[in-house]
Amino acid sequence: MLARVSSTPTFKRLPRAVREQQMLDAAVKVFSRRGFHAASMDEIADDAGISKPMVYAYLGTKEELFVACLHREGTRMMEAIAGAAAPELPADERLWRGLRAFFGFVGAHRDGWAVLYRQARGSQPFAAELAAMRGRLVEVVAGMLDHALRASGREVGATDLEVVAYALVGATESLADWLADHPEADAEKTATRMMNVAWLGADQLLRGVTWHPGEV
Amino acid sequence: MLARVSSTPTFKRLPRAVREQQMLDAAVKVFSRRGFHAASMDEIADDAGISKPMVYAYLGTKEELFVACLHREGTRMMEAIAGAAAPELPADERLWRGLRAFFGFVGAHRDGWAVLYRQARGSQPFAAELAAMRGRLVEVVAGMLDHALRASGREVGATDLEVVAYALVGATESLADWLADHPEADAEKTATRMMNVAWLGADQLLRGVTWHPGEV
DNA sequence: GAGCATACCTACTCGTGCGTAAGGTTACGC
DNA sequence: GCGTAACCTTACGCACGAGTAGGTATGCTC
């Protein structure tokens, strides 16, 4: 005990807002390394250089803490994407910029990010939060496709559009996972690859080309 | 206590193999409903109509049990796909049949399946098992693309191929999630939609068409 | 430089659920 | 009909970690 004294004679007393950010940083790190369940509040507090009751005082229970992490990171990502893909641009340019921003973000937050998302898929309370975020993304992509379709005088059922958007988002998330697992990989290049898959497919679809089973 | 006596006077003594399957069925059900952590061994044993120590005797610890579930379900799925997509068929036909088999499988095992996969993403021990399985799938898809490419005299870097395959698999898994969440949706139709996205995109790529950023 | 609010700590309680020890019960061979 | 081995049970130990009670230091205000 009291080991702290020797190394840090006068430990700082910091305002709440600062501590909260430190805690969130630590939480993201630990949650992503250990997973939600295996992460202990003690370790998070320790990593933040603070004691456990402080965490409870500021950010509440473990679940609330996790939701707070999810929320902060999610918001940051959404902002990064939204800032890049302005609605006035043509569809391909919007898609490209959105993908660039997305993969750039994941590449920069490798440690915390993708793993945080991998966690959230699992248990009920967070699934809702995550589903909402993904829902917004799907909506954006679907809207983009719809816009492009109408521009070329075509139209398609809402469900079809949603499903295609869903597939695109899924593919993108999947590549984000891949990127997070391959530290040597380049975010920009990954974005280009995704663009190739997504756009060349989407482009064909937008032209009204559809595939159908040979027999049935 | 002893409530069992009245309803089932002579309760069967069953051979190990049968009990193991019952336990796995129960485990899949409970894990998928509750998630790995929230699931309790007691509930699983209860649901299997057996007592806890039996589960430990036959399938080992909780983690081992989960891996066993993952393994059984994964193997079944792989067999369903492999049986459908024979290597001699042309690429589009293989892809189509593979997707049909996959979505058919997920549609039939909605409850157990997708959710089991959603769980496995999370914590370390299972991530390995799942990654291995997905790895085999990616390999199959990549091999298929490579085959088709060589047939048309073209060639592409191994990493590119892997990444594209990865994206395709990711999109497919994502639609599987969607399917699992929408009970009213039709597996066949979902497969067709996926085929549209995947094939029209892949077809373009196979023709050597590539997209690249407008500026840079 | 007293008082008060707020940052911060150590050290505990207590529920939950994994895994097991030790003992009944049923089928089957002889 | 009796032993023996496999099947199956009830009831417990025990660790781990979420959340808390109650006390201490610090800095800001007047």
Image: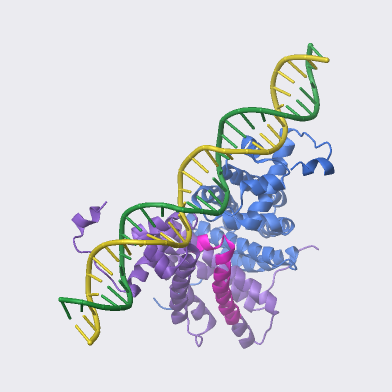
Chain colours: A purple, B blue, C green, D yellow
**Residue closer to the observer: A131 or A105:** A131
Q: Position of residue A54 (x, y in %)?
A: 37, 65
Residue found at x 65% / y 72% = A163
Q: Is residue B202 magenta?
A: no
Total numbered circles:
0
- Image: magenta residue range: A117-145
**Residue closer to the observer: B20 or B88:** B20
Left or right: residue B34 versus residue A187 is: right
Q: Is residue B26 above or below residue D13?
A: below
Most common SS among magenta residues = helix
Q: Position of residue A123 (x, y in %)?
A: 57, 61
Q: Quadrant of residue C30?
A: top right
Q: Quadrant of residue A164?
A: bottom right
**Residue closer to the observer: C9 or B54:** C9
**Residue closer to the observer: A48 or D16:** D16
Q: Position of residue B204 (x, y in %)?
A: 59, 68
Can you see residue A49? no
Can you see residue A142? yes
Left or right: residue A214 versus residue A198 is: right
**Quarter that holds the C terminus of chain A:** bottom right
Q: Is residue B60 above or below residue A75?
A: above
Q: Position of residue B36 (x, y in %)?
A: 58, 53
Q: Is residue A141 magenta?
A: yes
Q: Is residue B208 above or below residue D27?
A: above
Residue found at x 83% / y 36% = B10
Residue found at x 46% / y 66% = A65
